[in-house]
Amino acid sequence: MAHTPLHSSGYNSRLPPPPPVLAPHAPSSLAAHAGPNKENPFTIPHSHAYVDPAKHLPAMPRVEALHPSPAPTYTPPHHRPLPPSPTKTTATATVNHYTRPLGGNARAQQSQQAEPTMVQLLASQGTAPAHYASRGGAGDVTMGNATGVLSWRKGQGFKEWEKLKLNSPEVKRKADVAQLFFYDHYFDLLTYVSSRKSRLASFQSSISSRPSLTPAEVSSEWTSYTCRERVLLRKRRTKLKVDMFHVVTQVGQGGYGEVYLARHKETNQVVALKKMKKRTLAKMDEIRHVLVERDILASTSSPWLVRLLYAFQDPEHVFLAMDFIAGGDFRTLLNNSGVLKEEHARFYIAEMFTAVNELHKLGYIHRDLKPENFLIDTTGHIKLTDFGLAAGALNPGKIEHLKHKLDEVADSPLVFRSTLEMKSIYKSIRMADARYADSVVGSPDYMAIETLRGQSYSYSVDYWSLGCILFEFLAGFPPFSGATAEETWTNLKNWQRVLRRPHYERPEDRIFNLSDEGWDAITRLITHKDRRMSTLDQVKTHPFFRGVDWPNLRERKAPFIPALDSEIDAGYFDDFSSEADMAKYAEVREKQRHVDAVAERALDAKLARGVWVGFTFKAKKKEDRLLREKEQREKQKLQEEEEESLYTLF
């Protein structure tokens, strides 16, 4: 914040001259010196007399040395009395009653030039420091300048512990959330006021256009109008709850919660409702990841990213209601197709690059890309989801876990397999465990090697993952998959030796052999980070993507368009009422049971209360649009019924 230049005394040099000074023997009450029938515009009115702040702050030691006596708790700047300028001397300015002269102890401490504490800085600005002290602020060093008034730190800025606190991710996030909250609050308030005025004007116009109405009819119309306004006001105050949604069926299961297909009872809006336990998230130190996912979903309006509609909580759970993408995830498509034609692989990987680039524009790295993270909408196009790991840094425990896995296989022998053998093994693994990627921490089949090693990384780690996905599109298996988890980790440890161009010998399989352009694109993505393609512009110029109409990707007809019976058709998701489908999640449920058995982390009481601050979210624009559409449908239906009744009558 910019500050107005100050005199050495700490007061604004551009303000009007100060009032006449008081006599040295005058009492502290300003009322006795206000003068007969006169009010000084530069002094505080009599009804706002000075109050000694020490009476309200018993925990503040030596506060009389910090404040002028008497001092206000707070007064707007244009009402504050000013002391005489130290650069001017007059015969009458012998004592300044707006500042207390320094005593012997204060002078001794002034000579030490100790850095003022936050309590003192707040006190010097007329702000009661008790609010700060109750939250951990401390310090009782008495410090004053030549006038006895504590000034700013004279260019020293914040202390180190204050800088660390202000730069912590938690504080930064809460500051952003607070800013967005007030922007949203006042935008919503002004929008409501404007729409209410419009509705009132429309009502008045409707009444004026019908002069034949009697006063009783006008009164009845007005009563009806005010009732509608009260209903709108109640809806604005309604707190989001899970019972506002009608759950249709379960469509997903994870280690920390479940995903349901649901419909909002008021708007009929179809959503994917993600439900997570607060205790489980706290145990596994996943709270920050959920908050990051909420922030990303709430901040995007891109058609390439799944959008958040509602975020709310109850004492036990947090909920994320997102757009329901009815075509299922890309893993289901791969399981059914096996290998994609090169033209189809080019189309889908181009859309995936575009979706990841939209996430990078928001300043986030996904770091956990895999086919399961890409959903297919009703038009057959791609949307990116699952941003839980798209934070600034991996959980330290997970980093150690990944590094430990690599270290464990340091001496394991490397097994070289043929392309046909690797494809057959991966297919059998997928058939045995359809949720294979969910059972391994961080999906190492697709994670960049620098992430697995706990090294520094950049946006290019997502391009490594997309290179692995492109390899699977064209070959039918990921480049580093093995017959066992240990073999997969061994392949990742020796990735440069394992990454080989797939080659099929049999004539009927030669159609699956990669083109030179396709293989070159893969090797430009799965490589050392200093040689890896890391921007969308670099990808666009690669020969493999020649002919791709990047600006109009979503306007092109997709190779696969889901066949849906209705907007709540969940046919492309697992049936959680089927024992066969539930068997796929046996390992996921086992992991969930292990998490439930983990001892709860000892969370600080204040942290437990404030960790979910700012989580609630409501996409008002779309909801308002849906409400208007619902009202229009009901009005149209009513008109059609009236027309039908008239037709029947005649």
Image (cartoon, rainbow, N blue to C red):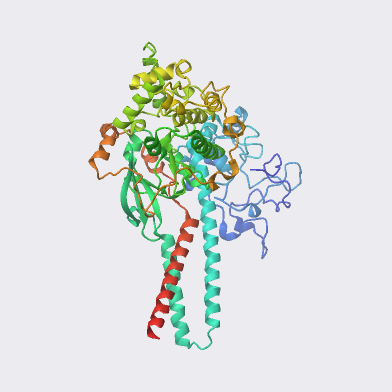
Q: Is residue 419 above or below residue 374?
A: above
Measured as percent of width and height from the top left, residue 520 is found at 55, 24
Q: Is residue 19 above or below residue 293?
A: below
Say whether residue 557 is visible: yes
Measured as percent of width and height from the top left, residue 481 is found at 39, 23
Residue 492: quarter of image: top left
Judged from this view, the residue extending furthest toward the front is: 507
Observer-nearest residue: 219 or 251?
Answer: 251
Would you say 520 lies left or right of 36 here?
Answer: left
Figure quadrant of the C terminus: bottom left
Judged from this view, the residue extending furthest toward the left is: 579
Q: Is residue 306 above or below residue 490?
A: below
Measured as percent of width and height from the top left, residue 46 is found at 59, 60
Observer-nearest residue: 111 or 530?
Answer: 530
Observer-nearest residue: 553 or 87?
Answer: 553
Figure quadrant of the N terminus: top right
Residue 102: quarter of image: top right
Would you say 494 lies left or right of 358 here?
Answer: left
Would you say 483 lies left or right of 292 here?
Answer: left
Total numbered labels placed on residues in the image = 0
Say whether residue 478 is visible: no
Q: Is residue 395 above or below residue 611?
A: above
Measured as percent of width and height from the top left, residue 260 is found at 34, 47
